Image (spheres, rainbow, N blue to C red):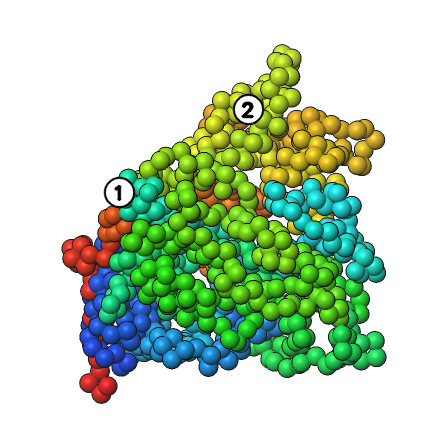
Amino acid sequence: MALAFKWLTRILLLMVVLGLGAFGLAWLVTSGSLPDYDGKYRVSGIDQPVEIVRDIHAVPHILGKTDRDTYFGLGFVHAQDRLWQMEMSRRTAQGTLSELFGERTLRTDRLMRALDIYGISVRAVRHQSPETLAALEAYSAGVNAWISQVGRDALGRGAPEFLLFTQQIAPWTPADSIAVAKLMALNLTAQAAKETRRAALSLALPPERLRDILPDYPDQAVVGMPEFSQMFPQMKAPVLHAAAAPDLSPLNAPGFAGASNAFAANGSRTATGQPLLATDPHLALSAPGVWMLVRMKFPGTDVIGASIPGIPAVVMGRNEDFGWGLTTAYVDDQDVYIEKLDPQDADRYITPAGAQPFRTRDVLIAVKGEVSQSMTLRWTRHGPVIPDGFFGADQVTPQGHVAALAWTGLTEDDHSIESLIGLMRSHSIVQARPALALAVAPAQNVIMADRSGNVAMQVAGAAPLRRLTHQGQGRLPVPGWVAQNDWDGIEPFEDMPFVENPPGGIVVNTNNRTTNQPFPYHLNLDWGDSQRIARATRLLEQREFHSRESFVEIQTDIVSETARTLLPLMARNLWWAGDPAPDDTRGRFRKRALDRLAEWNGEMNQYAPEPLIYAAWVRALTRRLALDELGPLFDQVQGIEPIFIERVLRNVDGAGVWCDITKTEAVETCADITRLALDDALTELEETYGEEMDSWRWGDAHVALQKHPVLGDIFPFSMFVNIEQPTSGGDFTLMRGQMRNSGPTPYANVHGSGFRAVYDFSDPNGSVYIISTGESGHPFSRHYDDLSDLWGRGEYIRMTLDIDEARGGAIGTTRLVPDAAD
């Protein structure tokens, strides 16, 4: 026995030593890819020396003496810190992910090849202005200078992920940057998926019930349109679940395609007499995050803010005189066309002018470890044919037809990057507007402020003009062979919504409606939630004069107007139902929860149990109301829709019928269903978090999961690459933390404000900003997640253009020196 114990101990010790050795070897290999922020590099492609000061938070301050040198410096620092992220964006756009990851990403590659985003980006290069092309080329040269440095000095391939998946790093090109911008545009729209979802649900529900489950934006007038079944009478109600999203897909489901808040006050509404501006875009959380903070010093312009690795611009930020923020404009920029195949020749489809051949091209998709896959790409006069399983199109496409996608982003004549560059180099609202006229996709609400004391909001981006007789009005897929369904061009920029210095002195947008124009000048019939704008308006109107601190307070507000609206409706019968019987254990537990909710003010605080009880109750109630009517289609609407619940509990237009379970003989009331849903929620929480309600915490469930897109689900890498922290907020709070609403962690925070900033033009260098992760994309860097705790607590770092301040706490200074051969 003693001998056996001795050998077991030796084996365990050997395993520990081997494990530590393997970890040490991995550390030596991967740490070689950590960039040296104090390095000096001799490079080709710059005119004069470039200094890059990394401040205490590793934010690069790029000090170039020419435009070319500063763009070069941005490419260099993006590649230093986010080369793998850039490679993933490029490969996603190209449809070449399967070269690295095998069959798991084949569906995504098929989609991207079908859309041909990268091919369009290559052709778009020739449409760029000389100045924009020069910026793209200088930026690309900076990226490639770092890639060359990595190869020359054997710096671990530039990122640890390259050691696992590929030894090849192709040179960066201007087309790559355009493709990254188009990929972001695709990520920010879900209009096509909304159309097919509405069509699928319309086949399963009568029109009045469809208005319940997919309610119109409050006060939005909707003109009449035909039912989907009238346009396609051969279609029956679909019975399939929505297809699962493939790995690394850039598509988002409706409700997850982008949201944001931004607001600005001119001098008449601030304590200092100078404008304030706050901006926080909401996107899917990931590690590293979408955003990287940078400062770029050009001759005549000094700009600081949030950039997207791969794009040669500050996307949101400020310079000495001008600042801007963005919110998703919810422009209806996509349509699904159902194209009828020629019965005599399936290689042709029907148009108003008769049968016409598809434009086709055969491609091969390389798949790691497998035989390359062939694919025939087909394009119609409206756009590419959608592969099966995407945008929900296959569920609403009759036999003998195919679905095609029309999208503003699928254009070669795209000057969106030129628009960004012009925006960051503007010094007033007047200068910025011509730059915004160049934007194509994504369409954005641009909130602006300048040191002259002005504030404004401009909707920028391509908005399709549909004909007045368009059958679907952008809300339903339509027959592609009917000429009246074609787009009639793009809405002129001068007709897009614009407001400057309104009487109240404040502009604000939370993805709410921006125009009251009727169809077809409506921009959209489906807008973002109406709860955040109500809260923002209330808080902005509460003070006569605002300060930087009050803007921070509003931006990080965690009170849910939705909870304040729905909870009295959900609990009104239960609060007054009387005490439960002594032997009614479930009733007593329910009463404890109700007593807590009765005292709750709707604040989604991570340290409180009430937000968790409320969120679980609403989720269970949605399921109780809709599952029996929708069956498998419930997966398409299981996210919380407050207006649906309010319509049902108020019995608006007879919506109370949702409370009756159709599959039972009894007639259930809404009081019955809300009680059953509360019991469902409490049972779920008790099983997950224990019987002690006082110990439940919203933050334990509402964990911000910032997952590495490639390694985040692979143990043991997930231990090092994922960033998690408990958070406050919820689906409809201003400090938004949207829940997953499905799977084993339905309350996880997966979509939020990965960048927040408040610009103060009375003290520009006292402006503040933050991102949700850190500047580095390298999991072994201390700057991979060093900002995440500040972000989680609603705190910020200084957004300063004072170079002496940056140097004072600098963690390193990189020097780029022109190669003697240049």
Task: Decide if residue 784 is in sight here.
Answer: no
Task: Give the label, 1 or 2, closer to the camera.
Answer: 1
With 382 as the anchor, is 159 left or right in this view? left
Going by the picture, which residue comes out furthest to the front? 503
Percent position (x, y) of residue 673? 69, 30
Percent position (x, y) of residue 246? 59, 61
Quadrant for the N terminus in the image: top left
Q: Residue at x 38, y 47 (%)?
A: 264
Question: Against 115, is 612 above or below?
Answer: above
Task: Decide if residue 623 is in sight here.
Answer: yes
Q: Nearer the viewer, residue 221 or 527?
A: 221
Question: Against 559, is 66 above or below?
Answer: below
**Which structural element holds mark 1?**
loop
Q: Which mark is residue 621?
A: none
Query: Is disc 2 surrounded by few (<14), some (14 to 19) or many (20+) residues within 10 Å?
Result: some
Mark 2 and mark 1 in contact (Cβ < 8 Å)?
Answer: no
Mark 1–mark 2 distance (CA, rounded to whole Å):
46 Å
Q: Nearer the viewer, residue 797 or 243?
A: 797
Q: Nearer the viewer, residue 175 or 628?
A: 175
Q: Which residue is disc 2 drawn over? A: 593
Label located before the other in sequence (1 or 2):
1
**Which structural element holds mark 2?**
helix
Query: Which amino acid type corresponds to the residue marked 1 in the rendered image?
Result: Thr
Percent position (x, y) of residue 643? 62, 39
Q: Which mark is residue 272?
A: 1
Query: Is disc 1 surrounded by few (<14), some (14 to 19) or many (20+) residues within 10 Å?
Result: some
Q: Residue at x 62, y 77 (%)?
A: 373
Query: Which amino acid type corresponds to the residue marked 2 in the rendered image?
Result: Ala
